[in-house]
Image (cartoon, rainbow, N blue to C red):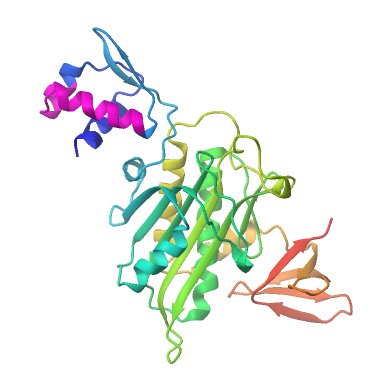
Amino acid sequence: MTRDEVLDFLWNNVDSYVSGTELADRLSLSRTAVWKAIGQLRDLGYEIESQPNRGYRLHSVSDVLSAEGIVRHLRHKELRLQFYKTIGSTNTTLKALAAEGAEAGLALIAEEQLMGRGRMGRSFYSPANSGLYMSLLLRPDMPAVDATRLTACAAVAVSEAIELLSGREAGIKWVNDIFVGGRKVCGILTEASVDCESGMMHYVIIGIGVNTHVPDGDFPEELRGIAGAAFGAEPVPELRCRLAAEILDRLMDYTPDPAAPEVFAGYRSRSLVLGREINILAPGREPVPARAVDLDENYSLRVRLSDGSERLLNSGEVSVRI
């Protein structure tokens, strides 16, 4: 695609001027085709300067989210990406595609979600220009009980990617929330279709929403004090494309063997609840105070209640008592 060829050439010469003639000659294009491609890239949001007798220059701080930009940084080229400027929900759309027979390795990435979904039926705030929202389709030969392990793979993948690109530590609040600087910056929603007779999964969709930056005008009032951003104001070139690629690559590395010791170790070492006083939360019930004691190999949380008895939580939600 002409637009992608021009973008690749500009990235390979980032922050330097490239003449239209050189672009046309190197890519075997007409000057008109180059001009049209530059216009398309600007429409997508890329910052491209042009000066007479010097040509075009792409700013390295451009943080435009696109399938082409993600592929540039992706190791697992077998993945198939579909990008949406606006979508209802990447998970909902991908579930429909999975039901129609879409193959594993399809990932939907969106700039904005109008009906983003979180756990427990909650909505997930998904504004444009300040986040990364994506879902990956897998068809693992695994029993449904392994779905939690796949969620743990996602939590480790996101944490590692944020740490690599931000230099900040990421923590995991059981079972699937990522925190940076004491604020929630990512939620993960894993959904599966299961064969009731065999207990095996037809497919799994791992949905990930990351607040990369504080949105214009701040978070809604009900989220202030809870939500945060994984990255600060300092610009990072192609941040969201690089973040998406890092997360997807790690998911493809980890999910074939979600029981791998390194995944469990990565999850456990980042736990924000182990050894802490917590509240066990359930809809319509009073919080139950407990202490988070340990994790088992299935990522169930062992808790000790106030009467000294212990139990395993394999689903639900907890909050850390301060």
Q: Identify the residue at image location x=59%, y=55%.
A: 124
The residue positioned farthest toward the top in the image shown:
53
The dominant secondary structure in magenta is: helix
Q: Residue at (19%, 40%) from the top-left corner?
A: 1
Quarter occupied by residue 9: top left
- What residue sits 75% from the left and 70% below the top? 281
Where does the magenta region start and end?
Answer: 23-43
Image side of residue 62 versus residue 12, left or right = right
Is 115 situated above or below 21? below
For residue 206, side relative to residue 306 (left or right) = left
Q: Can residue 9 be seen in this view?
A: no
Q: Is residue 230 magenta?
A: no
Q: Which residue is drawn at 50% across and 55% down?
A: 157
Give residue 299's position: percent from left, percent from top.
61, 71
Which residue occupies the foreground of this view, 189 or 271?
A: 189
Can you say whether 222 is above or below 318 in the image?
above
Residue 176 spot, x, y in % from top left = 60, 62
Viewer-side residue, 59 vs 46: 46
Q: How many labels does the image show?
A: 0
Magenta stretch holds residue 39 = yes
The image quarter in which residue 194 lies = bottom left
